[in-house]
Amino acid sequence: ATAEATPVAPAPAASPQEVAQTGTLPLVPQPVLVEQGEGEPWRLTSATRIAATGDARPVARALAEELRTATGYRIPVPARAKAGDLEIVVDAEADYTVEGEAPAEESYTLDVTAEGARITARTAHGAHNGVQTLRQLLPAWVGSERPVHADWSVPSVHIEDAPRFAYRGVMLDVARSFQDVDMVKRYIDTLASLKASHLHLHLADDQGWRIEITNEGRVEGDTIDYTRLTEISGRTAMNTQGYQQELGRSGYYTQEEYVDIVEYARDRFITVVPEIDVPGHTNAALHAIPELNTDRSLPARDPETGVVDWNGTGDVGYSALDELHEPTYDFVNHVFGQIADLTQGPLVHVGGDESHAMGHERYVDFVSRAVPEVRETTGAGVMGWTEFAEAGLSQGEGYWEGSVVHYWVGSGDWVRDFVSKGGKAVVSDAGRSYLDMKYDSMTPIGLTWACRGDCDYPRYYEWEPTTVVEGGLAEEDILGVEAPMWSETIRGEDQAMYMALPRAAAILETGWSRAEDKDLASFSSRLGALGPHLTVTDTNYYESRRAPWA
Ligand code: TNX
């Protein structure tokens, strides 16, 4: 590694044409089929329009708005296309194939010639995916916040594309250290451009509580004052710090801000999956809510205050709700019910990891009651970390229908039992997908428990979702993959982006591209060509020496 050249600074002027001459277009994730044309490129000019009708219009409008900002052109959005325009077509019956196969939900085709460009899809989500591909073929200045004089040309090409998995996720832990709404939106923008489909928000943990919960809709007899969750635990965060590092950031999202995030994500075809971690990782809730503290909740309450002390260290596995206490379930149902109402999404994440202190039996008792109740209260599918599959071991066929096990570490037997009972798996193998691991021993922030030594993007690229869980999983049992970012050591946007990029791109390509199309050398060169896109949008990233950053 020492013989490798120092990377050159990113040069935002590198054009897709230059990269195209190397034979590979700068696309991440790699599409199913890319046929480069011989002809002249298509040129976006002051006369270009984006034609769209019906479900394609919001997608066209979003792209037009971005292009207006970057080019200074008018970019009208008429219903009918004329020569030279970009046309976006969404038609549930659209007749195209993806490498010979019937079009799926999120698929699209993109055709570019000197005469114009056209995206065809069966759904708006498919069209949005096509737009992300087109953006990567435009000069990186497409992300500029003010008009740039550039040659807005796109190489002649025919692309057919569809994702391997529906769930291509990233996670942000805002509990250990808070991230504000603007940061979350920028995270969404960056990852949406890599065709992410899910944003998992880890909203509560031992160190803090980040989402406003009101008392509205409490069931009869529930005397908990839910506003205390943010009143008290919105003010806490990690209180340990590394060398020259700041303390964790406190804060929380009001319900209005949270809905703003959810809607912003939805407009970019990203589904928010909210997580409140129970029954462990609950010290912040126990500290804020006296009614949750009993002689069996953990750790022991303070005899003076009746609640547990606040604990801002990164200790794990020490806290637990009391699974025999009725207010525990009032709390769980109220909190998940309210968050599900705000999210209006298909999944809620109940955590369920590392509940070491309460022991196996108590844990299984809690999950066995809480999961069916949360499912009923919210109407959403319930997702949980590997351990929660344990609670289904003695259950019959169909028990996990509509539920999702989120594999991080742990027993492949549990995961396979879970999917055999109707559930699906999201794979986040800790040693190959955790964005909070140090790249190497020189990385000033990050942890090393799941990956030590060389944890650069190649390791996060070269794994296969069907085989990474011990014993293996069938393709159809896998909903997708996710790259989680824990924040014990990560503060603010720049640090989060630095740890996420380029590794999240490796995970998202693993979720999108077919296994046989994945190739590390190709990924590296395509990745390097995306550097200018990150630079133009002022997005921090780790300039790995493995990639030829343009
Ligand atoms: C393990 S991953 C945890 C988190 C930590 C993370 C740090 C998981 C389900 N639990 O509580 O933040 O390690 O890498």
Image: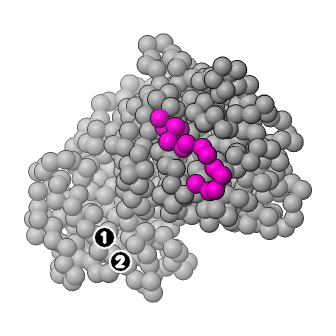
Q: Is mark 2 within 8 Å of ligand 1?
A: no
The local crowd at label 2, few if under 14, some if 14 to 19, many if 20 or more residues have their Cα within 10 Å, is some
Report the amino acid beneath label 2: Asp
The residue lying toward the viewer, choosing from 132 and 114, is: 132
For residue 161, side relative to residue 89 (left or right): right
User: Does any portion of residue 40 appear in the rendered image?
Assistant: no
**Residue 379 % position (x, y):** 62, 66
In which quarter of the view is residue 165 placed? bottom right
Q: Residue at x 37, y 43 (%)?
A: 181
For residue 286, side relative to residue 112 (left or right): right
Magenta residues, dominant SS class: loop
**Residue 259 % position (x, y):** 41, 55
Question: Mark 1 = which residue?
Answer: 58
Label pair 1/2, CB-CB below 8 angstroms: yes
For residue 380, side relative to residue 105 (left or right): right
Q: Check residue 228 for magenta coloring.
A: yes
Q: Secondary structure at mark 1?
A: helix
Report the amino acid beneath label 1: Pro
The residue lying toward the viewer, choosing from 110 and 229, is: 229
Image position of 387 with respect to 402: above or below: above
Label total for image: 2
Image position of 319 with respect to 303: above or below: below
Q: Secondary structure at mark 2?
A: loop
Q: Residue at x 40, y 31 (%)?
A: 492
**Range of residues picked out in magenta:** 218-231
Image position of 319 with respect to 190: above or below: above
Outermost residue toward the right in this view: 394
The local crowd at label 1, few if under 14, some if 14 to 19, many if 20 or more residues have their Cα within 10 Å, is some
Q: CA distance from mark 1 to mark 2?
A: 7 Å
Q: Check residue 517 for magenta coloring.
A: no
Q: Which mark is on residue 55?
A: 2
In which quarter of the view is residue 294 placed? top right
